[in-house]
């Protein structure tokens, strides 16, 4: 029995010794990892913080202070790595006079590694801009970015590169009504939106375009009107003119001085999407048989400088803008007559005589309209007001408030570019004054 008891004591002693040895071994390994990581934060089981040097920063007891001194004596971090040639062996630590004091409630140290937080950026949004209504209002909307989104930021600009952008809305809504813009020759507005999640902002959406009402009284000669189509560079021109300085009566002038020539002047601004109405007031400045003018609309443009003055073809035979369009060609011959043209293509044919640039029709001109305007015009030599209402179902033409005719061929009505036209026939010159030009959205 005595022998069994002795063996039992030995076994218990061995177990206790093994546990102490294992705990000591784990402690040494953890502290080595801490020193190797050079800054891994640790906390003790009693939640006493330990700084990056392994030093307990707040102890609240003498035991803690002693533990801090021990840690400072044995561990360090933050020293820059020396150059290879300057390396020196570290001095041996001084031997302890006595073993470390009890650690009290320090318990087993648990390493805590702070990993970088990874966020999914807010998503890129899809933006939509409605067409303007008759009150010159439209709505910008975007999709929901998800539950993490705290706000949406909407910007508006009149330059497509957003160099003049301003933030017009920031909040949780998914749409914004745009109102308060007066009709202007600067009638194009660019929009972009992004999602915000706390301090993180997403990428900007693609650009949305809003087109409002257009109005030009020609008091500002930077509004962009210029010759875009011409058959004779030196004899087809346009300019701004103050016809009566006393009345500040500014007008746009378009002039064709040689026989058989024609031209188009345009600011290369967009009209709102159909339905919309063009209205302008015009009069002939020179009375010559078969001189004419008209409103041009439904035109195309590829965005390049139009025309291209660097070459003959770029000037006369280009395909940059107004390759197809509608033209309310209004011809003076002591009275006024309408030739409502749907121009499907242009072809340079100087060998055929007459105008070197022919306006062509796929339907062999059967969809063009020829109409006398004398029932609607009391003074063909003076000012008359013209209105064209453009819809997907047809194009209605008015003079001085009177309905005249409707063009039912609407193939090109989605072309947004507009302007004015002038031409001569056998006689010259054809000069026309335009008092104002406006393009307004319609509701139906």
Image (tube, rainbow, N blue to C red):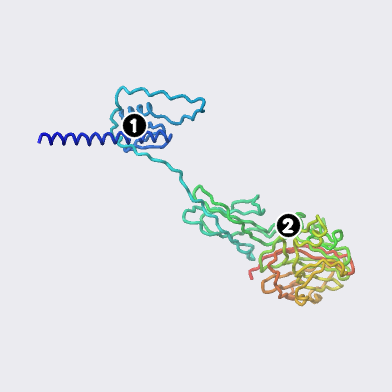
The one nearer the camera, 208 or 168, is 208
Find residue 249 and report its image quarter. bottom right
Q: Position of residue 292 (x, y in %)?
A: 83, 68
Give neighbour class at mark 2: few <14, some 14-19, many 20+ (Cα, 10 Å): few
Callout 1 secondary element: loop
Q: Is residue 105 left or right of residue 439?
A: left
Q: Is residue 251 visible?
A: no
User: Residue 277: image x %, image y %?
Assistant: 70, 68
Whichever of labels 1 and 2 marks the residue nearer the N terminus, that label is 1
Q: Nearer the viewer, residue 214 or 348?
A: 348
* Mark 2 lies on residue: 304
Residue 211 in view of the camera: yes
> Badge 1: few (under 14), some or many (20 or more) residues near its Cα, within 10 Å?
some
Q: Secondary structure at mark 2?
A: loop
Q: Is residue 118 left or right of residue 72?
A: right
- Residues 186 and 283: in front is 186
The picture quadrant where one finds residue 328 is bottom right
Indicate the quadrant containing the N terminus: top left, top right, bottom left or bottom right: top left
Q: Are marks 1 and 2 in contact (CB under 8 Å)?
A: no
The residue where tag 1 is placed is 59
Q: Is residue 296 above or below residue 59?
A: below
Relative to 189, say whether 46 is above or below: above
User: Which is in the foreground here, disc 1 or disc 2?
Assistant: 2
Task: Name the quadrant of the C terminus.
Answer: bottom right
- Measured as percent of width and height from the top left, residue 170 is found at 54, 53
Q: Position of residue 138 (x, y in %)?
A: 61, 62
**Residue under the image location 75 percent in, 54 percent down:** 222
**Image: 96 above or below 317:** above
State the CA–CA distance, disc 1 to disc 2: 75 Å
Q: How many marks?
A: 2
């Amino acid at each position: 029995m005595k022998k069994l008891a002795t063996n039992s004591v030995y076994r218990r002693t061995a177990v206790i010794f093994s546990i102490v040895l294992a705990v000591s071994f784990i402690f040494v390994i953890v502290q080595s990892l801490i020193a190797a990581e050079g800054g891994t934060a640790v906390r003790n089981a009693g939640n006493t913080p330990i700084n990056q040097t392994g030093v307990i920063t707040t102890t609240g007891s003498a035991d803690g202070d002693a533990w801090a001194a021990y840690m400072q004596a044995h561990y360090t971090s933050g020293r820059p790595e020396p150059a290879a040639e300057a390396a020196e062996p570290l001095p041996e630590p001084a031997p302890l006079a006595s073993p470390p004091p009890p650690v009290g409630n320090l318990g087993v140290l648990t390493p805590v590694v702070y990993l970088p937080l990874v966020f999914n950026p807010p998503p890129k949004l899809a933006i939509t801009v409605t067409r303007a209504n008759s009150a010159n209002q439209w709505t910008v909307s975007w999709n929901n970015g998800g539950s993490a989104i705290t706000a949406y930021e909407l910007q508006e600009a009149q330059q497509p590169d957003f160099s003049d952008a301003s933030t017009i809305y920031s909040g949780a809504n998914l749409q914004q009504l745009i109102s308060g813009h007066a009709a202007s020759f600067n009638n194009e507005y660019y929009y972009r939106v992004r999602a915000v999640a706390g301090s993180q902002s997403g990428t900007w959406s693609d650009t949305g375009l809003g087109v409002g009402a257009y109005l030009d009284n020609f008091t500002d000669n930077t509004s962009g009107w210029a010759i875009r189509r011409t058959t004779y560079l030196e004899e087809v021109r346009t300019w701004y003119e103050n016809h009566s300085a006393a009345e500040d009566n500014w007008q746009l002038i378009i002039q064709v001085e040689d026989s058989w020539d024609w031209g188009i002047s345009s600011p290369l601004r967009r009209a709102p999407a159909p339905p919309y109405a063009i209205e302008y007031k015009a009069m002939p400045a020179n009375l010559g048989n078969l001189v004419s003018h008209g409103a041009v609309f439904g035109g195309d443009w590829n965005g390049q400088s139009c025309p291209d003055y660097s070459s003959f073809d770029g000037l006369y035979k280009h395909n940059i803008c107004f390759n197809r369009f509608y033209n309310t060609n209004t011809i003076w011959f002591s009275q006024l007559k309408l030739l409502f043209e749907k121009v499907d293509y242009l072809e340079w044919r100087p060998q055929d005589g007459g105008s070197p640039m022919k306006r062509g029709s796929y339907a062999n001109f059967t969809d063009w309209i020829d109409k006398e305007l004398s029932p609607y015009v009391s003074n063909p030599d003076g000012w008359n007001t013209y209105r064209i209402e453009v819809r997907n179902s047809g194009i209605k033409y008015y003079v001085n408030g009177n309905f005249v005719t409707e063009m039912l061929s609407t193939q090109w009505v989605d072309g947004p570019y507009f302007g004015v036209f002038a031409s001569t026939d056998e006689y010259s010159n054809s000069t026309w004054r335009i008092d104002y030009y406006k393009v307004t959205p319609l509701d139906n």
